Image (tube, rainbow, N blue to C red):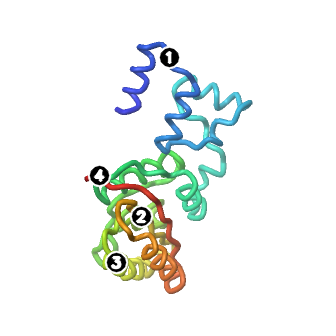
Amino acid sequence: DDYNVFIFLFDMTQTFSVEQQHNWFIRHGFASASDFKTGETSSVNASQQGTMPASTPKETKSDFESMINAIESDFEPEKITDEEHLQAQLSIFLKAKFPNAIVEREIKTERGDRIDVLVDGKFAFELKVPDERVKLRNLMAQLEEYKEQYSDVCAVILDNQNLNLSDTIREYAERYQSKLGVRSIILTGKKRG
């Protein structure tokens, strides 16, 4: 809906440009600046027709490392209301960046817990928006259980800039890596309200 409003407004005012469309895709996490390199006619033609440029082989490759790198470098969450809102944003980003991947939310594990985002039935992403140290401590137990079922697990943690938890988040991210072999992606952002 947001994209339709964007197109409608710029179309009505006759100020729509390809560069504005590129910026919109980048700002909303559907593409990165490298997707719109100058001189690549396929990208320009695709964007002029209102579609995304063709994905590069690197972007369509559904491997865990590529997904982690894409999230770290290109995913910028907008202000969120809660963890589910962050899940939705990350799911949309992964579907756009890896169109051949199967991205699912809230998938039940063998023990009855729910993994926030599961890609291709094997890559588990557990998201947290901590407001206190206890949530980070509890995340350790969740990740440990998920590692029993999935070999590829990643913690995605939003460091709410309205709180003073940055050092604690980094400390726990190091623990997840050293004790469980689970990488963490720390995103900075803000929570509404």
For disc 2, the neighbor class at 10 Å (few under 14, some 14 to 19, many from 20) is many
Q: Is residue 125 above or below residue 18?
A: below
The residues tagged by marks 4 and 1 sit, at their Cα atoms, a distance apart of 32 Å
Image check: 179 left or right of 88?
A: right
Q: Nearer the viewer, residue 154 or 57?
A: 154
Q: Amino acid type of disc 4?
A: Arg
Residue at 41% of width from left, 27% of height from top? 6
The residues tagged by marks 3 and 4 sit, at their Cα atoms, a distance apart of 20 Å
- What mark, if any, has residue 133 been given in the picture? 3
Q: Amino acid type of disc 2?
A: Asp
Q: Quadrant of residue 44?
A: top right
Q: Which residue is mark 4?
A: 192
Secondary structure, mark 3, is helix
Q: Is residue 29 above or below residue 62?
A: above
First in residue order: circle 3 vs circle 1:
1
First in residue order: circle 2 vs circle 3:
3
- What mark, if any, has residue 15 been given in the picture? 1
Secondary structure, mark 2, is strand
Residue at 61% of width from left, 54% of height from top? 61
Check whether the beta carbons of the residues at disc 3 and disc 1 lie within 8 A of each other.
no
Residue at 60% of width from left, 35% of height from top? 53
The residues tagged by marks 1 and 2 sit, at their Cα atoms, a distance apart of 37 Å
Q: Position of residue 152 (x, y in %)?
A: 51, 72
**Extreme bottom residue here?**
179
Secondary structure, mark 4, is loop
Residue at 29% of width from left, 52% of height from top? 192
First in residue order: circle 1 vs circle 2:
1
The residues tagged by marks 3 and 1 sit, at their Cα atoms, a distance apart of 48 Å
Q: Which residue is mark 2?
A: 159
Q: Quadrant of the N terminus?
A: top left
Q: Position of residue 126 (x, y in %)?
A: 40, 68
